């Protein structure tokens, strides 16, 4: 399986040159076929044409560099309303937001946490659930999303 960090290093300069932020990547394996999701963002939002432009550029880079050894589908999109969080800076932007976090391994007997992101302290995120705060190391987080509570 390809290294997501290597893929990020390969494509980020081109995404930035096109005027977008590379919000994050997900490489999801589904048997013999994988999906590479590339999330892009910018202040004025993302339109379908933006995704097409980035997809064309990234596809060319991946065809030349060939960092994914299996068959895969490339998807380029906006992070959307329930945006995934990848970096500490992402968490900092969404302090006081409702988040859902899934850990790689159980902590306090649980892997899933849904609550208010109250702080980022060093390499840890702090989530309040009811009246209890949990300090979760970012390295232990498998997946995290900001969730709109409607």
Image (spheres, helix red, strand yellow):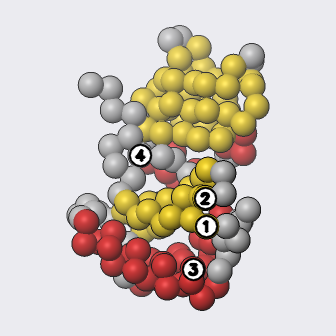
Of badges 4 and 1, nearer the viewer stands: 1
Residue at left offset 34%, top offset 49%: 80
Residue 82, position as x, y percentages in the image: 38, 40
Q: Are marks 3 and 4 in contact (CB under 8 Å)?
A: no
Residue 141, position as x, y percentages in the image: 66, 40
Dot 1, crowdedness within 10 Å: few (<14), some or many (≥20)? Answer: few
Residue 58, position as x, y percentages in the image: 48, 78
Q: Of residues 40 and 128, which is closer to you in this image? A: 40
> On screen, 141 above or below 31?
above
For the residues labelled 3 and 4, the Cα–Cα distance comes to: 24 Å
Q: Earlier in the sequence, mark 1 or mark 3?
A: 3
Of badges 3 and 2, nearer the viewer stands: 2
Query: SS class of the residue under badge 2?
Result: strand
Residue at left offset 49%, top offset 23%: 115
> On screen, 117 above or below 110?
below
For the residues labelled 1 and 2, the Cα–Cα distance comes to: 5 Å
Residue 34 visible (yes or no): yes
For the residues labelled 4 and 2, the Cα–Cα distance comes to: 24 Å
Q: Are marks 1 and 2 in contact (CB under 8 Å)?
A: yes
Disc 1 target residue: 71
Q: Quadrant of the N terminus?
A: bottom right
Residue 69, quarter of picture: bottom right
Disc 4 target residue: 83
Query: SS class of the residue under badge 1?
Result: strand
> On screen, 53 above or below 22?
below
Disc 3 target residue: 62
For the residues labelled 3 and 2, the Cα–Cα distance comes to: 16 Å
Q: Quadrant of the C terminus?
A: top left
Residue 33 got which mark? 2
For the residues labelled 1 and 3, the Cα–Cα distance comes to: 12 Å
């Amino acid at each position: 399986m390809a290294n997501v960090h290597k893929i990020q290093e390969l494509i980020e300069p081109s995404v930035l040159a096109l005027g977008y932020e590379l919000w994050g990547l997900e490489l999801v394996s589904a048997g013999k076929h994988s999906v590479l999701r590339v999330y892009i963002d910018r202040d004025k939002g993302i339109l379908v044409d933006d995704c097409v432009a980035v997809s064309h550029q990234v596809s060319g880079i991946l065809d030349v560099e060939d960092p994914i050894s299996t068959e895969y589908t490339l998807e380029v999109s906006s992070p959307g309303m329930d945006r995934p969080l990848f970096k500490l800076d992402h968490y900092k932007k969404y302090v006081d937001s409702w988040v859902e976090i899934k850990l790689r391994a159980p902590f306090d007997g649980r892997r899933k946490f849904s609550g208010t992101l109250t702080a980022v302290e060093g390499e840890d995120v702090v989530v309040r659930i009811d009246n209890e705060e949990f300090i979760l190391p970012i390295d232990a987080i498998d997946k995290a999303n900001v969730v709109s509570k409607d």
